[in-house]
Image (spheres, grey):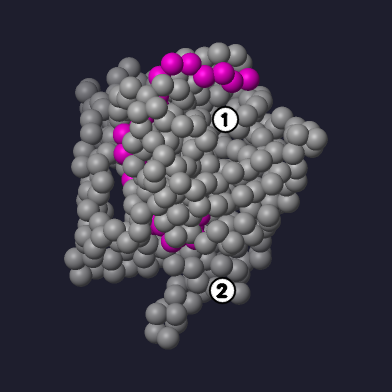
Amino acid sequence: MRIAYFDCFSGAGGDMIVAALVHAGADAEALRERLAALGLSGYALTIEPINKQGFAATRFNVALDESHKQPHRHLTHIEEILQGGALPQHVAEQAAAIFRRLAEAEAAVHGTTVDRVHFHEVGAVDAIMDVVGAVAALDLLGIERIVCSSMVVGSGTVTCAHGVMPVPAPATAELIKGLPVAATAEKGELLTPTAAAILTTLADDFGPMPAMRVGSIGYGAGIREGEKVPNLLRVFVGESEAPTEIDRITVLETNLDDATPEQIGYCIERLFEEGALDAYTVPINMKKSRPGVVLTVLCEDRTAEALQRTIFAETPTLGIRRYQVHRAKLARRHETVETPYGSIRMKIAEGLGARTANPEYEDCRRAAAEHGAALRDVMAVAQAAWRAKEGS
């Protein structure tokens, strides 16, 4: 499994994430082509080597043309740009997920709804380039798992569209809730909202560097000059040979004997929409011999609070059990197969003598809808294409 580990010892910016990945080996020209496919104008893009405070690094810079007025954008405008930009579908979807997470943070901070969030700095062309550039660079490197160190946010104040705010900026603070944060004596905003949204959306885990065989190391340079710590983001790219991975997830549970099937079904739908890894019910007998169910939700630590609120809002429960567990997973990777219905990603899991390959449901669902085909036929064709590819 190909792994990227982001060492945020001096924070992170969206441009630093892209630059570090290019320095670690992502093809700069292929990245330029993907960004050009967005069809945006009014900017000049440079990707160049730089010596940053004594370290060889890469700088990714999007310089805006001051004579070209950039509009403020809502989430729907950005989603339209991503879907119309001739990007690989999974790249567009991941970039959209990052902007949606950012919109949710902004909505929480300003007491509004996602559809009314008016992006300022993060709706500009340079922020769109940073987000799409980060997702595209990870894709070009074939990264299958992302782990991130503790977050370093900085200190002092930062000037933004809403005035002078304390560090971390409100949206950044919302995004890193529930994640490990490391102290630093460095002044200024070290972690930007764009970088926080990218890392908290894409990272599978936060903490120490996982067991891996390091193949390359990249340094992404920021604009500022660090006073005590170089303004750099470091990324390690390598392979994991472990047959299983161990991560930590949160389990939410509650017993229900007074909720209707409609309420439970709707609640589970909402839980999946809000990031649950899994949600299910198991029938039980409760007090006074009443039939009921246990609603169980598996989720990442960072989404537990929001999912807990959803359970309280959508069911009559008065209490939720909450605990953390360690989970062992077979190492997984993706391979793409070409079919008459288009490109379909296959999820490959292997280790401890086991090996399975299953087509990604969302890819098959989309292909079935676009071609007017039965879902089972698309999945069968994808499975056959993978077997043929393996046998060739």
Q: Nearer the viewer, mark 1 or mark 2?
A: 1
Give the mark nearest the N terminus, 1 or 2.
1
Residue under label 2: 339
User: Residue at the location (22% across, 53% down)?
Assistant: 211
Quarter residue 76 falls in: top right
Q: Is residue 200 above or below residue 311?
A: below
Task: Give the extent of the magenta segment.
Answer: 137-161
Horizontal arrangement in the rendering, residue 297 relative to residue 367 (left or right):
left
Horizontal arrangement in the rendering, residue 167 relative to residue 164 (left or right):
left
Asked if residue 59 lies in the magenta stretch, the reply is no
Q: Is residue 314 visible?
A: no
Q: Give whichever of 329, 19 is nearer the camera.
A: 19
Q: Give whichever of 374, 386 is nearer the camera.
A: 386
User: Residue at the location (60% across, 70% down)?
Assistant: 341
User: Type of residue at label 2?
Assistant: Thr
Pointer 2 local density, CA inside 10 Å: few below 14, some 14–19, many at least 20: some
Image location (x, y in percent) of residue 363:
53, 59
Residue under label 1: 103
User: Residue at the location (44% across, 80% down)?
Assistant: 389
Image location (x, y in percent) of residue 81:
69, 45
* Residue at the extreme bottom of the image, as rendered: 392
Name the disc covering residue 302, or none: none
User: Residue at the location (45% across, 54% down)?
Assistant: 23
Image location (x, y in percent) of residue 21:
45, 52
